[in-house]
Amino acid sequence: MDLIRLSFSIEKSLARRLEALVKAGGYRTRSEYIRDLIRSRLVEEAWRKNEEALGTITLVFNHHQRRLSERLTDIQHHHHAMVMATTHIHLDRDLCAESIMVRGRADEIQKLADSLRSQKGVLHANLAMGSTGKKLT
Ligand code: NI
């Protein structure tokens, strides 16, 4: 890996906060923390620019809601090219959770998450905005 050394100036108070964040995050070095900070900003930018991304949609829903499982599966079939893996777990007698890993343009992932979230009986839907990792090195 081709490394360069950067130096920059920040306020003392910010530098102290940076050190606290590095420590709290369990990082061994400040450099590794800054690298992760930059990568996470790059992922945010990729989503903002609607680039290809990876997303994980996690749903919690009521098992007894009429035809809901079928509707959620229909929606995923409709987006079969994007959906890479789905894991379903039975949380208890009444509730299910489903974790759906998808790959595609950021806005398509967002739309898919919205259409799953808005189904009657879905109690919670979370979209974790991930990356294909292509531009992170
Ligand atoms: Ni279930």
Image (spheres, rainbow, N blue to C red):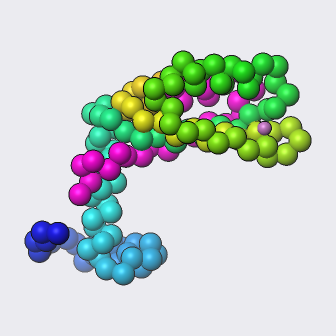
User: In the displayed structure, would residue 71 be above or below residue 12?
Assistant: above
The foreground one among 14 and 89 is 89
On the picture, is 6 further left or further right than 16?
A: left
Q: Position of residue 22 (x, y in %)?
A: 38, 75
Q: Quadrant of residue 57?
A: top right
Q: In which quarter of the image is the N terminus?
A: bottom left
Q: Give the range drawn in magenta.
A: 112-137
Instruction: Decide whether residue 129 is among the magenta residues.
Output: yes
On the picture, is 63 further left or further right than 102?
A: right
Q: Quadrant of the C terminus?
A: bottom left
User: In the displayed structure, would residue 12 be above or below residue 98?
Assistant: below
Q: In which quarter of the image is ligand 1?
A: top right
Q: Which residue is drawn at 66% across and 39% down?
A: 98
Q: In which quarter of the image is residue 63?
A: top right
Q: Position of residue 65 (x, y in %)?
A: 81, 24
Q: Where is residue 35 in the image (x, y as percent from the top left)?
A: 27, 65
Instruction: Decide whether residue 57 is among the magenta residues.
Output: no
Camera sees residue 136: yes
